[in-house]
Amino acid sequence: MNEVRAAAIYARISSDVEGSGLGVERQLEDCRKLAKSRGWTVAEEYRDDGISAYSGTRRPAYQRMLADLADGQRDAVIVYHPDRLTRRPSELEDFLKVIDKAGVRQVHFVAMPTDVMTGDGLLLLRITAAVAAHESDTKSRRVRRKVEQNAKLGKPHGGRRAFGYAKDGLAVNEDEAAVIRQLATRFLAGESLRSLAVWLEDQGVKTVVGNQWRTPTLRGMLASPRIAGLRQHQGNVLGKAQWSAIITEDEHRRIVALMQQKARSGKRAPRSYLLSGLLRCGKCNATLYSARRAGTVRRYVCQSGPDHGGCGGIYITAEPVELLIRDAVLIRLERGKVADAMAGWAARDEQIAAVAEQLADDQAQLEELVAAYAAKQIPMREWLLARAPIEQRIKAAEQRMMSLSGNEALRGLPSNGAALRGSWDGLNLDRQAAIVRAVLDHAVIAPGVLGARAVDPNRVEPVWRL
Ligand SMILES: [Zn+2]
């Protein structure tokens, strides 16, 4: 036997522990014993932790060992079992090429006493590698299939408890469900996620892991098909889930559409002015900007300059004009404008119902397709092909639905004018602004009289939507 001066020991533990399934330490220990029993000097121990050879994930230590072998730095290799060294037959062939070229004749496996460098040993090694590859392949397919199957059956994915549901993922947590319903209603009424997160904090409502709600978490929770009783898998809604819905599918679609619309129109700073974007300059028709100079009162200003393009010739003190518009809005709502709006909704609701019906049809078609795919009546490729146009129709319908629900802000308001007036101050600025926007298209602000102290109501000319 040739003297071995620089043996390499290789050990790997994978996340899909099976087969020899030993910890790296135990593998190393056995490999060291084998080296010692043969009187070999170990030059280096190469270890890859938590990496599956089959998944094709890069194994840095393994690559380093191959490079050292190719360089002639190592003259023997000891591994616990062939399935630790490689799990793909092609990888084994690459390994064999490297050691053949480097002239390394000593490759030993603790769990395989045969000399693998002889003809029969090599055959056995190849068979072992092929069997390991097959096992690993079926195992990952088995895991994948289980996840897909759960999804198709509408079963929970498992894992961490979802807000609104018990640990089993099926039973509804009534306290949290009430919070979700309120969040959905208020979001659809125009309140921002940021403002809702503040409300949750005020109420002492925490996430399932006990953290404070932040807008991204809140967005994810509110947009999730789960709370509408829908099962999602890899970003696609597969159909009805086995758990109960907390909000309706219609609400879910409107929430998602509204979020997409907000994402398209860009992020905006938290509102601090009721009439931002609603006032126009009576001289040049530019939109007035809210501005506050240090030590002065809040104002809306026509701003000149490259970013704004106004004439710079007008400003108006914020508070009086806000009170004025607020009163005008409330009066319009009191004088039956809400009733008029309701009548408008009836027509819109009919259209929405028609869109919703089409959505339901498309959803049903999707579910049939999923069932056919689940029953192996159609292959995956066909399923994906058939699904695409339906999903496009659903997307278009959702956009249509969004444009039809423009007056959402007024829904749920007290129809009695005095009651609305009484509750106005209790509404936060987002909600108030949403109501104003539902009623008022914009208001034109005429130039003021030089030196006038109070705001002249005649300067404000509202253009109403309702
Ligand atoms: Zn102007």
Image: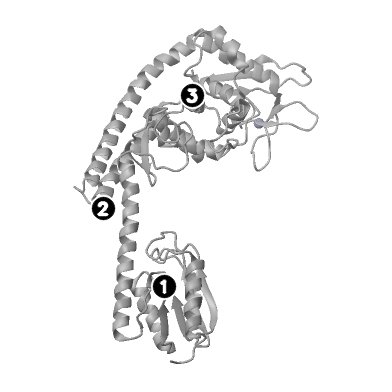
User: Real-space Cα distance between discs 2 and 3?
Assistant: 41 Å
Query: Does dot 1 land on a helix, a strand or a loop?
Result: helix
Question: Sequence order check: which comes first, mark 2 or mark 3?
Answer: 3
Q: Nearer the viewer, residue 185 or 169?
A: 169
Residue under pointer 2: 381
On the question of residue 34 being in view, the answer is: yes
190 lies above or below 97: above
Q: Position of residue 459 (x, y in %)?
A: 66, 18
Establish if 376 lies above or below 41.
Answer: above
- Labels 2 & 3 near each other (Cβ < 8 A): no
Colouring chosen for the image of the structure: one colour
> Where does the image place residue 358, in percent across and percent down from the top left?
28, 31
Q: Report the residue marked by disc 3.
A: 178
Q: In the rendered structure, which amino acid carries the disc numbered 3?
A: Ala
Residue 261 point in image, percent of width and height: 47, 36
- Dot label at residue 362: none
**Residue under pointer 1:** 85
Where on the image, by quarter, is ligand 1?
top right
Q: Mark 3 vs mark 1: which is more N-terminal? A: 1
> Which numbered disc, 3 or 1, marks the residue closer to the eye?
1
Quadrant for residue 242, please give it.
top left
Amino acid on which disc 1 is placed: Leu
The residues bearing labels 1 and 2 have C-alpha atoms spaced at a distance of: 35 Å
Above or below 332: residue 70:
below
How many C-alpha atoms fall within 10 Å of the one at disc 3: few (<14), some, or many (≥20)? some
Point out the residue furthest to the left here.
Answer: 377
Pointer 1: residues within 10 angstroms few (<14), some, or many (20+)? Answer: many
**Closest to the observer, 459 or 73:** 73
